[in-house]
Every structure is written in C-alpha cells, then in structure tokens.
Amino acid sequence: CKECLCSAPPPKISDLMNDEDLLYTLRLKLDPTHCTVKNWKNFASRWGMSYDELTLLEQRTHGATYHSPTQEFLLRYNQKPVTELTELCQLYQRIDVLRLLQRWMENDWPSRWQKAH
C-alpha cells in the first residue's frame, strides 16, 4: 500500500550500495577526473579524508577494472544518510548526481525497503 511505502526510513549509503545499477551510474559520474568537474575526491575530502588517504585510494584503484574510487569512498562512509550525499551534490553543483539520487530515494528505495521488510 502507498502508506506502507511512505514509512520507509531514510536510506543510508549502505542501502544504495546494494543497487548495482545505481552504483554503476554513480561510478560513471564520479570516477572520472576532469579538472572542471567535482568528483569523488571533492566529496571524500569534504567528509574528512586526508590528502594522503585520497592519494592512496586513487593509486590503489587506478587502472583496476573492478575497483572504483567512488565505490571505495562510499564504502568508507556507508553509515551516512544518503541525504548528506545529496547535500554534497548541491554544494558542488553536481545536479546530474543529485537528480539520480533523488529519483532513487523517491522511486526505488521505498519498494526495496518494503521487499526487505
């Protein structure tokens, strides 16, 4: 019922990590390094990762087909609410990522939560 779907708690980053399609799209949007576009490094730095940690993570995932710096950064902060991630999107004017996350929270998350509970 619609009422049950609305009672889903606010999702945490760990919840979105279970959605392979969403995670794939987030990696496509946040992994690339373009000097004019804010990426995973800006987000991670804002949440407290040091320069050394960022460099180590970048080196560890560079060239790896199955490791993504975005995914690693999200794993590290997986207990934060997705709303905090959307706030970073607004701060860095990543409207593309913001819309993706908002659509997921409005459409996919309630039904995923309902199926799990």
Image (spheres, helix red, strand yellow):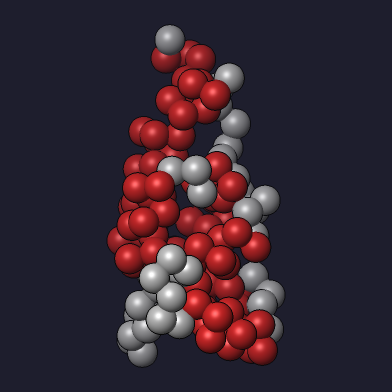
Q: Quadrant of the N terminus?
A: top left
For the point 50% across and 43% down, which residue is it? 18
- To which quarter of the image does residue 12 belong? top right
Give the x, y percent position of residue 82: 54, 50
User: On the rendered structure, is 96 left or right of 71?
Assistant: left
Question: Residue 58, percent across and down?
Answer: 52, 82
Percent position (x, y) of residue 10? 58, 37
Classify 83 as above or below 87.
above
| Figure quadrant of residue 19 | top left
Q: Is residue 49 above or below residue 14?
A: below
Residue drawn at x 35%, y 43% as measured from the top left: 103
How many circles with numbers are drawn on the protein?
Answer: 0
Any part of residue 70 in sight: yes
Is 59 situated above or below 27? below
Q: Is residue 91 visible?
A: no
Which of the pair 110/14 is nearer the observer? 14
Residue drawn at 39 percent across, 70 percent down: 65
Quadrant the C terminus occupies: top right
Q: Is residue 35 left or right of residue 42?
A: left
Tell me residue 53's x, y (percent): 66, 82
Instruction: Residue at 59%, 47% (x, y): give it.
Output: 14
